[in-house]
Amino acid sequence: MKKCLLVVAASLALSGVAMAAPVTNIEKGETNAGYIYWNPNVEYNSLDLGSANANGFFVETALSDKVIVGVETIKGKKSATDSGITSSMDARFTDVTLQYKLSDQVRLIAGNRNYDSNSSVTYLGSDNISTNKFITGLSASTVLGEKMTGYASVLTNSIGTDWQVGVNRNMTENVDFNVNYRYYDGDTATLKGIGAGLVCKF
């Protein structure tokens, strides 16, 4: 039964996660689309719940030299069975953002994040949480080498703050490989871990 309660706690922790797509260079008329994966270790009220998997996709389009619009959706899932009782949770977070380039290296970010999570425990039923929160943030990037760019970003809302540092490596002219580290700090939950992804430019 303890494992089942831990999964429900993980559901509550993951329902507050703020995640951000990798910061990539994009110019007027270009579109980036990508796949992202994150495997954070989850702590809820200082209790270690182990790792969880999250997979997502994003699309960003530069409408002008200064303005980028984007949509990102990420889904995570966790379950456990103990003494014949199964508990499970899945959470989906969808961001719609507007980014404004202060320079080629610095952007302001604002938008809406929809949190949608479902949890269930055998014999106890299920619950669904869905809410929208206004998000704000900032990102900065710098060239690290001929084919590598480093970046840092922060997103925050009334639920928590998500920090991300990462590196994009050009595999081809239009495909980047991304590796990042994210640290989420919320009121009752902490998530931290390495992520990776692929970004395609059109």
Image (tube, rainbow, N blue to C red):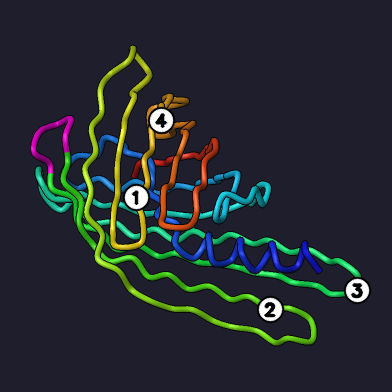
N-terminal-most mark, 3 or 1: 3
87 in relation to 163, above or below: below
| Tag 3: amino acid | Gly
First to last magenta residue range: 101-106
Pointers 2 and 3 in contact (CB under 8 A)?
no
| Tag 2: amino acid | Ser
Which of 27/81 is in front? 81
Q: As drawn, which residue projects farthest toward the front?
A: 46
N-terminal-most mark, 2 or 3: 3
**Residue appearing at x 58%, y 59% in the figure:** 76
- State left or right for residue 87 relative to residue 174: right
Q: Which mark is residue 84?
A: 3
The residue at which mark 4 appears reads as 166
**Residue appearing at x 41%, y 30% in the figure:** 166
Distance in Å between CA atoms under marks 1 and 4: 17 Å
Residue 151 falls in image quadrant: top left
Q: Which mark is residue 161?
A: 1
N-terminal-most mark, 4 or 3: 3
Distance in Å between CA atoms under marks 1 and 2: 27 Å
